[in-house]
């Protein structure tokens, strides 16, 4: 990056951060002090993998957003929230969370990426509802924009709606500006639909980089990876998915599955089996404190 670009970037970040602080204050209310309850977890370093192979580069800007690319940066700030109630943005991490910070002995997280997809997400929501369980959904902006009702259903059921970029790119291959577009436009569609921006994001393919940590933090989000990868996108069979979840179950683990991106009927069927099994073993699927 040239010195000129750095200057432009610094100048550009200021309104983004201020905007995020205001939005967080609005979303969380006056009394909510936003702090993670634990320090950065010890996990494996930034690495790719864990999700389907990266697709060919998408052509053109994200499509389907009511607000065009970049418009989220141009919105006027209209909040009257007093300065003393504005929580600080999260710190810039050097690695994502991979487990629940300081979980109880029975806590686990189920997470579903790439949706919402009207073919599979409703079944997953129905199963979670049947057992009164909350989960994390890392949605793609282009899917969220097409399925706002499903996004609202997630939020209404108490699930965490996280940011999984707009078009599911391989983030380290993107410019800093493009990463900001991918994450910013997705946060924008989530906020427009749910009334509050997301507090968590997950890099597609688990491919994080420093720019994504910095931009995610500036947008008010913490990075969440996973502990147990079901590899459900390879359609290994429902039995195999169930076995991977049950074998990987342990306090604080985060399970990765998908509710979109291909045929996810095995993921849907597996949840119906492993969720009651986990509960039967005493686990309590939940979501992180920050939500
Ligand atoms: Zn994904």
Image: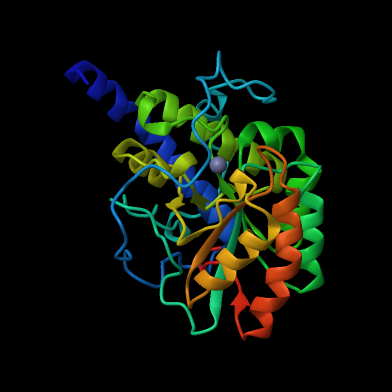
Point out residue 153 in the picture as x, y percentages from the top left corner: 78, 53
Q: Residue furthest left?
A: 3
Of all residues, the one furthest to the top in this rendering is 60
Compare residues 287 and 152 and report the one nearer the observer.
287
Residue 85 seen in the figure:
yes
Would you identify the image quadrant in which residue 59 lies?
top right
Residue at position x 81%, y 43% in the image: 119
Q: Position of residue 176 (x, y in %)?
A: 36, 27
Q: Residue at x 32, y 39 (%)?
A: 209
* Closer to us: 82 or 118: 118
Residue 25 lies left or right of residue 150; in this view the side is: left
Residue in the image at 74% along x and 55% along y: 268
> Whole-percent x and y of residue 164?
54, 42
Task: Tell me how the rendering is colored.
Answer: rainbow
Vertical placement of residue 104 versus 94, above or below: below
**In the image: residue 126, left or right of residue 228:** right
Which of 231/174 is in front? 231
**Residue 290 percent coordinates (x, y):** 50, 64
Residue 113 seen in this snapshot: no
Decide which of 254, 161 is in the foreground and name it. 254
Residue 173, picture quadrant? top left
Total number of numbered labels? 0
Left or right? Give the position of 216 relative to 257: left
Q: In the image, ligand 1 is in what quadrant?
A: top right
Examine the image and state in which quarter residue 214 appears.
Answer: top left
- Which quadrant: the C terminus? bottom right
Screen quadrant of the N terminus: top left
- The image shows residue 176, relative to residue 227, as above or below, that is above
């Amino acid at each position: 990056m040239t010195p000129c670009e750095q200057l432009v970037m610094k100048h550009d970040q200021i309104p983004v951060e201020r905007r995020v602080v205001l939005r967080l204050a609005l979303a969380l209310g006056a009394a909510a002090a936003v702090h993670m309850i634990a320090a950065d977890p010890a996990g494996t370093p930034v690495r790719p993998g864990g999700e389907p192979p990266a697709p060919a580069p998408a052509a053109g800007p994200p499509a389907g957003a009511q607000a065009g690319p970049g418009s989220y940066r141009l919105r006027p700030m209209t909040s009257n929230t007093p300065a003393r109630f504005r929580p600080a943005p999260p710190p810039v991490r050097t690695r994502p969370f991979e487990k629940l910070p300081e979980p109880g002995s029975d806590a686990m997280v189920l997470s579903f990426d790439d949706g919402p997809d009207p073919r599979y997400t409703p079944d997953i929501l129905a199963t979670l509802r049947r057992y009164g369980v909350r989960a994390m959904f890392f949605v793609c902006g282009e899917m969220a924009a097409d399925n706002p009702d499903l996004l609202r259903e997630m939020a209404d059921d108490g699930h965490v709606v996280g940011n999984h970029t707009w078009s599911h790119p391989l983030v380290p291959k993107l410019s800093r500006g493009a990463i900001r577009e991918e994450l910013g436009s997705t946060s924008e569609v989530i906020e427009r639909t749910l009334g509050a921006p997301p507090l968590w994001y997950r890099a597609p393919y688990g491919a994080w980089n420093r720019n994504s940590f910095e931009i995610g933090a500036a947008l008010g989000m913490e990075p969440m990876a996973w502990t147990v990868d079901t590899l459900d996108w390879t359609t290994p069979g429902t039995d195999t998915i169930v076995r991977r979840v049950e074998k990987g179950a342990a306090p604080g683990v985060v399970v990765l599955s998908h509710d979109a991106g291909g045929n996810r009927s095995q993921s849907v069927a597996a949840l119906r089996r492993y969720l009651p099994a986990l509960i039967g073993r005493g686990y309590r699927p939940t979501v992180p404190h920050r939500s």
